[in-house]
Image (spheres, rainbow, N blue to C red):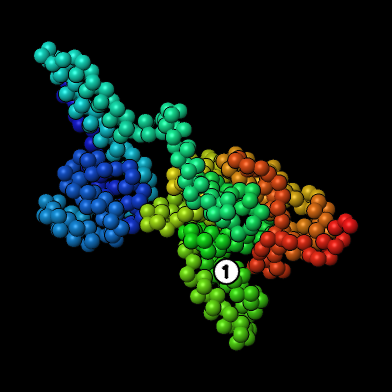
Amino acid sequence: MNEIINPQDAELEEIVLGACLLESKAITLVADILRPEAFYTETNNEIYSALQSMYRAGQAIDIMTVKEELARRGKLEFIGGLYTLVRISSRVVSSAHLEFHARILKQKYIRREAILGFHKLLALAADETTDIDDTLADAHTLLDRLEKECGNSEHLRSMLQLMEDTVKLIEVRIASNKNGITGLPTGFADLDLMTCGWQPADEIVIAARPAVGKTAFALHLARAAASAGYHIAVYSLEMQGERLGDRWLLAATSGVNPDHLRSGQLTPDEQQQIHAASIELSRLPIHIDDNPSVSMDYVRSSAKLLRSKGQCDGIIIDYLQLCDMKSDQNNRNREQEVAQASRKAKMLAKELNIPVILLSQLNRNVEGHPDNRPSLSDLRESGAIEQDADLVLMLSRPALSGRATDRKSTYPTEGLGVIGIAKHRNGSTGELYFRHDPSMTKLEDYVPGIEWMKKNTTA
């Protein structure tokens, strides 16, 4: 029988370790994939063991901190000292494809375990002094362990297990609901009533034409959830962070005229309002990333890092079509790229078990619809967005159609915003209304004015 060589790749092991030493976010991508045993080389095994321990403890990771951790463990000389850490780090340019590399190492580890296990079973099968039933039991145990390592059995549940898990989830909702809200509050009473808040693992798409107020709406959602104590990560691809804080957050919270903020011509009272608002907002658990070249892989890496620290209960991406769609497959068209980004957003929502809110553009066709009311077919560049989303909200402002009265609700169009729930996988659809100020910095529940009430109330 030919000798079987253990599958391993010391070079790939060093590339994964080097990425983790160089980039603080890299370890978040591989910590749930690899265990120290997955590294065949003993020195690499020790280095990764230190890395993983530091990550679990929330410690900062770089060459010097890992050196200190290895020294504390008495393993620094064993791995070759600081020179080895520097040498490994110098092999890496970036953490691109890191997860793919990690999964290759995991497969090699599982193959090694399979070879070792089957060799033992072969010896037991050939030993006639061993009870064959015991050998078969060992074979089943080995296969179960290998399947668990591969993750093949993690998602397979019996109906009994599924019902137990479902009942537990319902019990959690009963215990944690606040006036019927079981997810992240939206900041709109009617929207909370229809959705019970933004639900974990859901992909929520908020779509509108430019200048309708997608960003203002999204920031209202972020403030509402953060004010309730939830940690929100906002990835702003369109606007600089300071502009978000200036026009949308401070103006909306302080009530100061946004034009005064932009021109810098503020009265002493307005300056005091701004400072008070900034103090109030600074306490909110919101993280804003305004990197203009963000891909869904970047968002995933960043969000996983925040989630590991307990600082990410929901994600807002403004907006989908601006995501960096670079792909190894150069023959992909724009629609396929957007579809891939949407799919990754859905996978991220399920992986982290949090709502992911995607802002999206609509086609120009909306402008030809009655009162500019959009529909699902108006989602720009990809029908896959509609397919992946658990909830699709269409925003419109009837006043932009030039009408003084909304034909559907008969409300005055001035300051009227419409939330059209075009798709709701787990609930009903329909239209809701909100009120906004002229600058779209302050949004609130819509209550018809006294004149409208008098006019439309029958005696």
Residue under the point 21% across and 15% down: 133
* Left or right of 110, for residue 259: right
Q: Position of residue 262 (x, y in %)?
A: 62, 76
**Three-letter code for the amino acid on which mark 1 is drawn:** Leu
**Residue 170 in sight:** yes
438 to 149, vertically: above or below: below
The image quarter containing residue 121 is top left
Q: Residue furthest right?
A: 459
Q: Residue furthest front?
A: 459
Residue under the point 28% across and 60% down: 59
**Mark 1, residues whose alpha carbon is within 10 Å: few (<14), some, or many (≥20)?**
many
Q: Position of residue 207 (x, y in %)?
A: 64, 51
Name the residue beneath numbered marker 1: 249
Secondary structure at numbered mark 1 = helix
**Residue 349 in sight:** no
* Left or right of 314, for residue 196: right
* Left or right of 71, for residue 391: right
Residue under the point 74% across and 64% down: 415
The image quarter containing residue 129 is top left
Q: Nearer the viewer, residue 205 or 16?
A: 205
Residue under the point 30% across and 34% down: 149
